[in-house]
Amino acid sequence: MSTVTVKIFGPLRETVYGKKIDKIEIDIHEGETIRDLLVKVSHIFTNFPKISFEKDDEITKTGFWIFINGRNLMHLNEKFNIKLKNGDIISIVPAVTGG
Amino acid sequence: MPFGWAGNILYIDLTKGKIRKETIPKDMFTKFLGGRGVNAKILWDMMKPGIDSLSPDNVLIFGAGALTGTNAPSSGRMTVTFKSPATNLYAKSTAGGHWGAELKFAGYDNIVIIGASTKPVYLWIDDKHVEIKDAGKIWGKNVRETDKMIKEELGDEEIKIACIGPAGENMVKFAAVMNSVYNAAARCGGGAVMGSKKLKAIAVRGTGTIEVADPETFDKLAIDARKSLAKDSGAQGLYLYGTAGFVPGVNEQYAFPSYNFRAGQIDGAYYISGQYQVEGGYLKRRHGCFSCTISCHRFTSIDSGPYAGAYAGGPEYETTGALGAGCGHTDLETIIKANELCNIYGLDTISTGAVIQWAMECYEKGIITEKDTDGLILEWGNSDAILGLINKIAFREGFGNILAEGTKKASEIIGKDSWKFAVQAKGLEQSRVETRAAKGYALAFAVNPRGPDHLHTEVIAEFGLTPEAIALIEKITGDKKYARPDIIEKRAEIVRWHEDCYAVTDSLGFCAFATTLAYAVNPDNMAKMFTAATGIKMTEEEIMNTGRRIVTLERCFNVREGASRKDDVLPYRLMNEPAPAGPVKGMMNSPQELNKMLDEYYSLHEWDTESGWPTAEVLEKLKLKEVAMELEQLGRLPSKERRKK
């Protein structure tokens, strides 16, 4: 079992339990991807978009900036299919763009 | 009267107390556009090399943009140009607000100030009536008080005032020229130059108009640009959260300089972001400059707690970094209070924060103690220390007198190895950009004639954060794969495009947020708006070439002052100490890397790669022959032809 840290910002911080948190540690299985993680995270945080996360352009339309260990996901080849490793830090920042 | 421009320059000789108005020769406009461009040419023509920046020999020039005063979107900016007392090199500093438009409506494009008064004075421009007035009652007053008292004395709330506070009067090397609650031409010490001339303020009231040559075409272009701006994702973000809205994203990329550039990330950065300004109830109003719909300005205030009652325009991203993360804390109330003090004293927040965090590192290393700091405990994040030092700096009291010299000079005074962590180059403190993680910025900062600063060549597009930014990188380089900041390839091309665009932006009076952060105003529609406004035809290529001419002239000013390739460096820390964490852990802006980018940059510009000096050939091409002649007499004009022989 491995663990990654998800850092979260702005209105996304509100959880379904009513509490606001800045970061959370999530257990992952071997082979799980960023896409899988987003599905997990969307069930914890109230203001996450209610989408399936299966289609890449659906995810980018949400306007999030997603960084993995400080790198912009959109600059990496595998993007949402990147396999997570123990200790990875994933930051989900609502883009400073859009309404 | 010409179209677009007001057509007049005011010359003020403060030594003789004389005022002269002249019409601007047409080729000044066609070659240098206006604002920053015309200012630069006037500075070149009137300044002797080697003068003391705080002597009456310095020339201080204010310029409104060629299109300032029209309804072109986000076109209200003004430029202040001078020889910097911090760097002893070329300085231009810009500000938004409404002062530039008011100057145009009064009938002037530029104001040139020479000499120095023996007593404090202020300039009053009331349409055609121009007067040098006694400033005895307002000398010593802070910016807020000055603004209020001048308006009361002259009996008009609509007057627009550019002024200095105590910091400028005390010739703090990073004193700002302030303009309303929201705007500062802050960098490089223009406020100190005003203070050295005993010029407290320039008050302007203009009731005239600006005419355009082809109103129908111009209006359509302006409206289309406005509509594009409304749709631009960068512009929308700026409205919502201001420049500090970038803090969380930049911090997550380990690119938010903290602890005097020792780290690129600080815990809790969200709590000093533009988003938190809203969430925490500190943001009370969003505000825009003349003709701007982006409205990135913030008005923040504190309702309770130890700093209850503090209010100011801002804080901006840079201020948040300089007076917050850079000083080792994430307390927004401290930042708002510190920002207020800088605004009312008239201090550049970037340099103020930089010199304070340098002092904190000196204290941590035991190079200075409480004995040196008048009892202040300069521990990282100590709010009392930050606010206490701002007060001392503005009035040059005690330890503040050393800090008021800027980090370069202060580190020479304090000695030991403190120069190694004075994060400055050319004498100017670096803007809050982690250049070890942003190579385009690294190159842009190294070659910027005023020092390592972003408001000259804002290459934020290299981060590829918006679809518009990625499209621009693809346009410049041919491939969107270059829209990433961690590589050195194509940085010279990216920097050059931005330099030229920024020079055009400043000279026409546009805001760089509309042209290099949002991209709705671009060289193509700027050329079209220029043509429709002035009646002088310019294509996109021609207007960018004019930008190139302005950038090259600014370079030549520094060459004349003795600068060369050896001055195109970044601060010691960034060139020699590796980034501590994140995707660029272990990387530096190494000399090897910088040299490679400089070689490409100079080649692209057709400058001599050994000296970094513009060649005779390129100055001829840019129709700067008289500049070439003067440099040749100084033995500073390389020539490709001569090298071949």
Image (spheres, coloured by chain):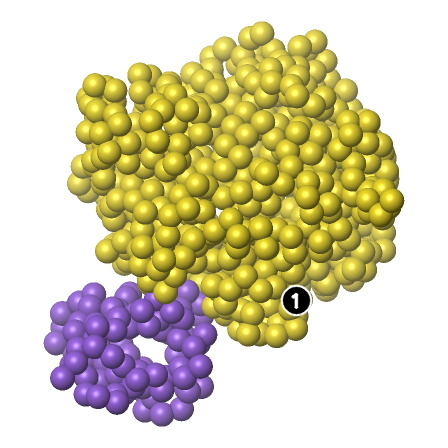
Chain colours: A purple, B yellow
Instruction: Identify which residue is drawn at 65% across, 37% down.
Output: B564
Q: Quadrant of residue B476?
A: bottom right
Question: Outermost residue, top direction?
Answer: B118
Q: Is residue B446 above or below residue B365?
A: below
Q: Which residue is mark 1?
A: B476
Q: Position of residue B181 (x, y in %)?
A: 44, 37
Viewer-nearest residue: B590 or B169: B590
Q: Please, what is the three-letter code of the amino acid marked with disc 1?
A: Ile
Q: Position of residue B84 (x, y in %)?
A: 57, 28
Viewer-nearest residue: A11 or B393: B393
Q: Quadrant of residue B240?
A: bottom left
Q: Quadrant of the N terminus of chain B?
A: top right
Q: Is residue B288 above or below residue B306?
A: below
Q: Is residue B464 above or below residue B607?
A: below
Q: Is residue A15 left or right of residue B446?
A: left
Q: Is residue B158 left or right of residue B241?
A: right
Q: Would you say residue B207 is visible in this rendering?
A: no
- Tell which subunit mark 1 falls on: B
Viewer-nearest residue: B154 or B338: B338
Instruction: Identify which residue is drawn at 40% across, 82% down.
Output: A79
Q: Position of residue B441 (x, y in %)?
A: 52, 53
- SS of the residue at dot 1? helix
Q: Position of residue B142 (x, y in %)?
A: 41, 24
Q: Quadrant of the C terminus of chain B?
A: top right
Q: Is residue B131 left or right of residue B24?
A: left
